[in-house]
Image (cartoon, grey):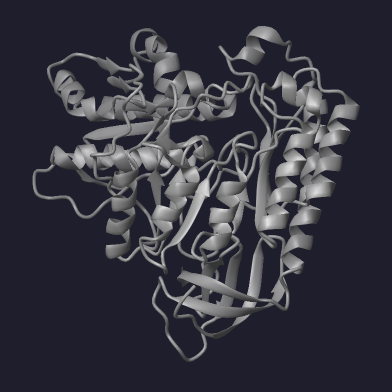
Amino acid sequence: MGTVTQKVFAPIANDGALVAPPLYHDEARQGSAYAEQQPIAVGLAAPNARLAYIETYGCQMNFSDTEIIAGVLKQEGYTFTREETEADLVLLNTCAIRENAEEKIWNRLKHLKGLKRKRPHLTVGLMGCMAERLKARLLEQEQLVDLVVGPDAYRDLPNLLARVDDGHRAINVLLSREETYADIAPVRLNTNGISAFISITRGCNNMCSFCVVPFTRGRERSRDWQTIVQEARDLYAQGYREVTLLGQNVDSYNHEEVGFAQLLVKVAQVAPDLRVRFTTSHPEDMTDEVLHAMAAHANICKYIHLPVQSGNSEVLERMNRGYSREWYLERIAAIRRILPGCAVSTDIITGFCGETEAEHADTLSLMREVRYDYAYMFHYSERPGTLAARRYPDDIPLEVKKARLQEVIDLQLKHNLERQQEMVGTVQTVLLEGNSKRSEAHYAGRADNNQMVVFAKGDTQYAPGAYVQVRILEATGATLIGELIGTVQTL
């Protein structure tokens, strides 16, 4: 059974140049936003070079992984194309968190099998989270791919490709307790040249009962903090003015007694005009120390993605989330106290195993109490091998899941508009990303709290990466519309 999920105003989908690929309209997940399939192109093909075409499905972590994969391929002499019909190598970097996401991959593989008949030399590979779970079916039963590579085996790509060249099918889905790819230079793909991702952790130790990530990405490990800071320095030197620190649970970062709060400060100190964002926080692990670090540094953006999943403590216990409704609301209160005006987004699942109407009502009441700036909302989809699949019956009818999801969406749409309208009359510091997608007479950029802002260019021309002040004149549910006041020298 396919999933029917929806999102309301994705923080990474903007009105100007792309920070990341646009989001699926029917996908969202715990921990981060979902990006649609995105062919990757870097530069022009060198004569006689092998051409690679990469599509990315899933979360921001997958998008970051694709940049690592491209880095490995670049070292092997590959260049990149936007046309799958030109490619010698087609890679799909996949997601397994939702049934619907996997269905999209199967359809793409069947299409590529047809393309392979026309181009017998074409190598097709499946990377990422689906690789470990479906390796046998992919390679042996349906023979849709030539190689299968798990999230911890990307540096083995050259060996696997050589094996395919020798006429064999190749596979490496071994999970690692050490791999962080800290020494591999990512190839920045399809970015606006202003914002970039930096992966700080891999894997996850939080065994949420609905989630396959611990099984597909392995146990949590933190990357050397010095390599993270150096990557931020390198990006700043290349002209980037915003970095997003990525992890399934950034708050649990710990390397050489440097915790996440200390890491935030170290990255913020790279340059005063380098904005620092992060995703995703876990309510059980987010500390006041992190909030005070954000308050003390103007260039750490005042925006937190704090997935709640449900507003009912009993449902949260069945989800194995590790906190109660009361604990979560205390964390929200701490954010409001220490970081007044900080934007907060969340993830919500409707129709989880055994959810009653009263438990669903608790989610709606929590939403009314918090009034999220954005939310990613979807109904429960059982994933094979998870604790929930083994322990609880998926007993909520699909039509009930959908109806509850619609109630959540309708309420969040109301809150979206209210939160946006509260910005009218304020002056926001905006990091300019480029022209508005709808009008070349307008610029688009992002405010500190992750709101997208559009404003008329006027007589003065600004380059992407400039900080400008914009007075907000009106608001829609997804965009702030303002007028340019002037530039900003310091944050």
Residue 80, placed above or below residue 489:
above
Residue drawn 16% across the image and 18% down it: 163
Residue drawn 55% across the image and 79% down it: 469
Residue 370, position in %: x, y?
A: 78, 49
Residue 295, placed above or below residue 288:
below
The quarter of the picture where the N terminus appears is: top right
Q: Quadrant of residue 271?
A: bottom left
59 with respect to 163 (left or right) = right
User: Who is closer to the viewer here, 189 or 89?
Assistant: 189
Residue 100, position in %: x, y?
A: 58, 28
Residue closest to the far left: 48
Residue drawn 78% across the image and 52% down it: 371
76 with respect to 200 (left or right) = left
Residue closest to the far front: 257
Residue 1, placed above or below residue 285:
above
1 with respect to 370 (left or right) = left
Residue 291, position in %: x, y?
A: 60, 52
Badge count: 0
User: Who is closer to the viewer here, 325 or 365?
Assistant: 325
Residue 2, placed above or below residue 308:
above
Residue drawn 69% across the image and 26% down it: 380
Residue closest to the far bottom: 459
Q: Quadrant of residue 167?
A: top left
Instruction: Please say whether residue 341 is visible from this viewpoint.
Output: yes
Instruction: Please say whether residue 84 is visible from this viewpoint.
Output: no
